[in-house]
Amino acid sequence: MPRLYLVRHGETTSNVMRRLDTAMPGAALTDFGVRQAARFALENARADERPTVLVSSVARRAQQTAEVVGNLWGVEPEVADGLHEVQVGDLEDRNDAEAYKAFGEVVEKWHHGDTAVSLPGGESLDDVFGRYLPVIDEVTRKYLVGPEGRDVYVVSHGAAIRLVAARLAEVDPHFAVSNHLPNTGVVELSYAADGDADGTWAAHRWGDRVAPFEPDAEGDASPMG
């Protein structure tokens, strides 16, 4: 069964400085981030040579990651609006503990169902879902399902990936909050169509954890991962 892989971009200068970097175009990959992207491509190369779709957000770091992967796979990446990181508004470019605390508190509220709460000067989770989920619906319909279904790799961003994956596959909120994705970490999902009704998603891998996910499994709760 074809899978959807939500891949966090490689390391950036903002990651190194722990800056909240969400506005476009955003920071570039570091040299190490480029190597991470290359290692991801080599470790996930398709031995069976099945056609693969590669899509990235409009952010510079996501496009650069996808370009490195695409060069090694021989796949031309697509760029899609709507897949960028949660927009943090007034917290942009900050790296202090107070800013991270404010962001983390809002994200935790989102994971527990209070989706209309907005970051100061930024987005609510309803805003994020409103732009991100239609892209997932489109690539699912266009590439993932049907007799010619193909694996789809979406290069995106840590907080957005966790929020969207938890929504799609109904992942336990505590697990989603507590387990961040490292750079080039992946959430692996499958989709089962259900006739004329909406299909169902299942999560198979979340970073280095494999389903079933234990709600009390603790990891690094960094909101940007």
Image (cartoon, rainbow, N blue to C red):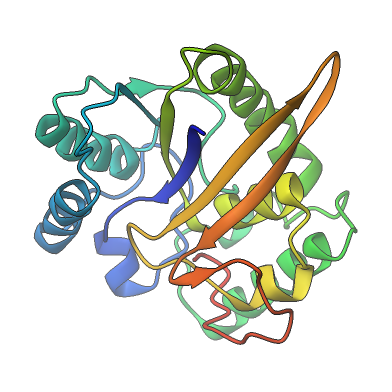
Q: Quadrant of residue 154?
A: top left
Tell me where residue 51 appears, x and y as whole percent.
Answer: 30, 21
In the image, 107: left or right of 31?
Answer: right
Q: Quadrant of residue 105?
A: bottom right
Q: Residue at x 77, y 68 (%)?
A: 173
- Residue 159 visible at all: no
Q: Position of residue 130 (x, y in %)?
A: 74, 31
Q: Quadrant of residue 214?
A: bottom right
Q: Nearer the viewer, residue 130 or 143?
A: 143
| 56 over 9 or under it: above or below | above
Residue 13 seen in this snapshot? yes
Q: Depth check: 56 or 24 in front?
A: 56
How many labels sit on residues?
0
How far from the left and from the top, in percent, is residue 31?
9, 58
Residue that appears at 83% across and 67% down = 109
Closer to us: 189 or 56: 189
Residue nearest the observer in this picture, 69 or 145: 145
Q: Is residue 200 above or below residue 33?
A: above
Looking at the image, residue 54 sits to the left or right of residue 157; the answer is: left
Q: Does 190 sit above or below residue 222?
A: above
Residue at 24% over, 62% down: 13
Question: At 15% from the left edge and 39% from the top edge, which residue is drawn?
Answer: 68
Residue 15 image point, x, y percent: 33, 67
